[in-house]
Image (tube, grey):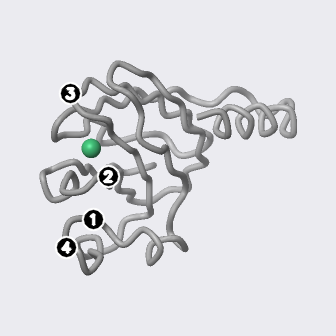
Amino acid sequence: MMTVVAVAAACSSGHSGGGTARVVEVTERDFTIHIPARIPAGDVRLVVRNRGPEQHELIIVRASEDRLPLRSDAATVDEEGLEPQTLGTLEPGPVGSTRELDVHLRPGTYEVFCNMAGHYLGGMSATFTAT
Ligand SMILES: [Cu+2]
């Protein structure tokens, strides 16, 4: 979480005059992720609330045509294999917490998911389109 804040601060000072990022509200709970289906392309700040009852991660990737690849444990997504298309990651956050993740969205389709064991398969993923 501290890393994300530091990156956000460095980013905003490094792009002075670029305007403020659009805030998009994301809600996580067992086992769903709510995110708007359409988000304007550009600089976006995802404000992620964890409504529990467990900790949840949030990983954002450019969507592929298929389901995301699973690790051999068959309980989690192969994050390493997705690195080339990964925009950002929030590590597991406590119940009730609100965290922020700044990303730059080019037009296209994206997928967000939680990679706690079993959560992705349990339904913790969602896709949206940046336009
Ligand atoms: Cu989760």
Dots 1 and 4: beta carbons under 8 Å?
no
Dots 2 and 1: beta carbons under 8 Å?
no
The residue tagged 1 is 76
The residue tagged 4 is 74
Q: Amino acid at mark 3?
A: Pro
In three-dimensional space, the C-alpha distance between marks 2 and 4, rounded to whole angstroms, equals 15 Å
In three-dimensional space, the C-alpha distance between marks 1 and 3, rounded to whole angstroms, equals 19 Å
Q: Amino acid at mark 1?
A: Thr
Q: Amino acid at mark 2?
A: Phe
Q: Residue at x 38, y 59 (%)?
A: 109
Q: Residue at x 50, y 50 (%)?
A: 89
Viewer-side label of 2, 4: 4
- 51 with respect to 64 (left or right): left
Mark number, residue 53: 3
Judging from the image, what secondary structure is the residue with disc 1 in?
loop
In three-dimensional space, the C-alpha distance between marks 4 and 3, rounded to whole angstroms, equals 23 Å
